[in-house]
Amino acid sequence: EQIWKYRFFYRDLNDLLTRNRVLEIHFKQIMAHKVHTATKLCEGLVSTGAMRATTDELRALATNMTVIASYWLSFEYACDPRGKVESGRIGRGVYQVMAMVSPFLLDESRGLLEKLSREYV
């Protein structure tokens, strides 16, 4: 929801970061925080038995979750630069993140995520 709220920023992220050093420094910290948060979320799922993944897989998954979540609107824009900007676009990004997590989830957790992810397609 926050990414949609600040979509102007995320859509032109690289351009904005090259023009503003202070913004570049702060956004680097934000990205590190996102990766850390995604890692902790996944570690929590592993510790409760809802997910199975190695440390390396968790690290890669958290990074990929952050990349997709942060750059999804740029991808959508590149695919349809003249298309109408709508909130459903970010929902498709949320779905992609969920699809990445799904193979690591076990039993009920996987079924619950698949049910939840249908709301974002």
Image (cartoon, rainbow, N blue to C red):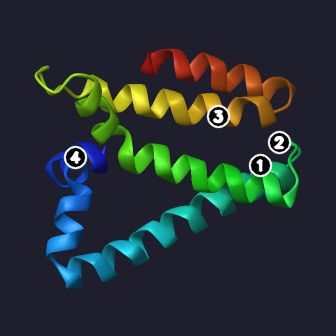
**Mark 4 touching mark 3, by CB under 8 A?**
no
Q: Which residue is mark 1?
A: 45
| Left or right placement of residue 3 versus residue 48 in this view | left
Please state which of the two labelled residues, at mark 3 or mark 2, is closer to the viewer. Answer: 3
- Left/right placement of residue 25 relative to residue 96 reads left
Q: Earlier in the sequence, mark 3 or mark 2?
A: 2
**Residue drawn at point x = 46 percent, y = 17 percent:** 119
Q: Residue at x 26, y 60 (%)?
A: 14
Query: How many marks do you count on the picture?
Result: 4
For disc 3, the marked residue is 100
Instruction: Assess whether mark 2 and mark 1 are in contact (beta carbons under 8 angstroms).
Output: yes
Q: CA distance from mark 3 to mark 2?
A: 12 Å
Residue type at tag 4: Arg
Task: Report crowding for label 4: few under 14, some 14 to 19, many 20 or more residues within 10 A (C-alpha).
Answer: many
Mark 4 and mark 2: Cα distance apart in space: 32 Å
For label 4, the residue is 11
Q: CA distance from mark 4 to mark 3?
A: 22 Å
Residue hosting label 2: 51
Q: Position of residue 65 (x, y in %)?
A: 56, 47
- Amino acid at pointer 3: Met
State which tag comes first along the sequence, 4 or 3: 4
Q: Secondary structure at mark 1?
A: helix
Query: Who is closer to the viewer here, 48 or 52?
Result: 52
Name the secondary structure under disc 3.
Answer: helix
